[in-house]
Amino acid sequence: LFGQVEAFAGDPILSLNDSFKADPRDRKVNLSIGVYTDEHGRIPVLGSVRAAYERIGFAERPYLPMEGHALYRDGVQKLVFGASHPALSDKRIATIQTIGGTGAVGIAADFLAKHTPGRTVLVSDPTWENHHGLFQRAGFKTATYPYWDRASRSVDFDGMVKALDAAEAGSIVVLQPVCHNPTGVDLDEAQQAAVTDLLVAKGHIVVFDMAYQGFGTSLEADAAFVRRYAARASCLVANSFSKNFSLYGERCGGLSVVCRDRDEAERVLGQLKLAVRRSYSSPPMTGGLLVGTVLGNDDLRAQWTREVETMRNRMDAMRKLLAEEIRKLSNEVDIGFLLNQRGMFSFTGLTEQQVTALRERDGVYLVGSGRMCVAGLNEANVPTVAKSFVDVSQG
Ligand code: LMR
């Protein structure tokens, strides 16, 4: 019956993580998947989340509504847009709890496919590979806009602007507002303002994918691009709590659609609920309660904010340490880029062949594109990584 089914080649990130787990070497280092580990190499259980878990206990588990838990949705809105955002006070944001950030982008794609069909979806080159897949699954054609300038290891801003300007008016544009995956380079404030003017003038539909809020500068500063954009125009915002709550397996995310007015937001919310009902009916409860409880309580939210800061500072410190260790070994390897990039990822510029050599020879796992997850570095593994990096760079 299924003889014609083709083999799945595997996901470039998730398959690599499986290979890492199967690697018998003791000194292997996982810098592939976007997962934060602490100085002991463990995925942390945040104190704020543990406290929330103790509060909620385990009681009856009715279905949540299609749109998710009210406390959670309220928390998403205040965290993403800021409690005093005009779109919030105007009640013109439709927000649902989603199954992770991936689920948020997936529902956004389904919603747009139904209500604004036939448009081209533009994603950055390079981007998180699943962006293409999620929009294609919903029936869209995807194309790219330039983002990465290999020579300067920074944003190819001119290329980006030209492509967005040349795209047909009303195209769908996916933007990562902070801690860009995979490059680690973001638009500065002036560039954000210029792109906003262009996107609004062209009538493009913007889908922000914000998976790393709090890992760049702060929870507030990282959301500034989205907040300013939402004050100007309608847009969609997918957010994830996988990384900043260290709740990867609980699949906690949100999708918010900023609308023109309250009436539109109510209708959009109805359609989001329908999209959820047709896909998985309603989101799961435990993760939703954990996040909702932390965000809805002043003390727990303050504790969580400090914990996000601790993770961010450790990632920044590891970038510095790796750069120092590499400099100690060689003055010839250019590693200034490590300190200019931010968030979990760093685009190293290593070729696929060099990445393979790192993995096969030294057990250091990066994604084939040359993306390194700096959140997997710690004091114990930095010397190994630095040496591998220098060896492979010097051929
Ligand atoms: C990543 O890019 O490594 C993470 O976002 C995990 C994933 O789902 O790919």
Image (cartoon, rainbow, N blue to C red):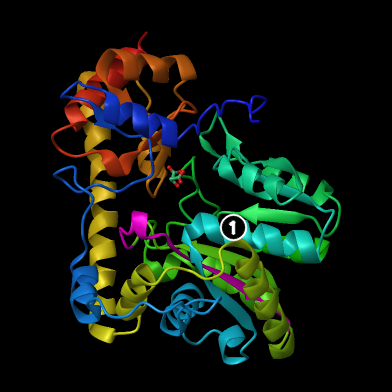
Q: Would residue 153 be found to the left or right of residue 376 on screen?
A: right
273 shown above or below 310: below
Q: Which residue is drawn at 28% across and 26% down?
A: 22
The magenta segment = 245-260
The residue that mark 1 highlights is 105
**Residue at image location 73% in from the left, 89% down from the top:** 263
In the image, is 127 to the left or to the right of 316?
right
User: Against 278, is 58 above or below?
Assistant: below
**Nearer the observer, 285 or 387:** 285
Q: Dividing the picture into quarters, in which one does residue 332 lie?
A: top left
CB at disc 1 and ligand 1 closer than 8 Å? no
* Spot occupied by residue 170 in the image (x, y as percentages of width and height): 82, 60
Q: Which of 170 and 9 is in front in this view?
A: 9
Q: Is residue 224 left or right of residue 292?
A: right
Q: Which residue is drawn at 39% across and 72% down?
A: 285
| Quarter containing the N terminus | top right
Judge by depth and name the residue closer to the eye, 207 or 306.
207
Residue 195 visible, this orientation:
no
Residue 222, image quadrant: bottom left
* Residue 247 painted magenta: yes
**Quadrant including the C terminus:** top left
Where on the image, by quarter, is ligand 1? top left
- Residue 385 seen: yes
Q: Specify the amino acid type for callout 1.
A: Val
Residue 347's place in the image compared with 299, above or below, is above
Q: Vertically, is 99 above or below 324? A: below
Residue 28 rendering spot, x and y as whole percentages? 22, 26
Furthest residue to the top? 395
Q: Quadrant of residue 246?
A: bottom left
Q: In what element is the residue under mark 1?
A: helix
- Residue shown at 56% from the left, 69% from the top: 281
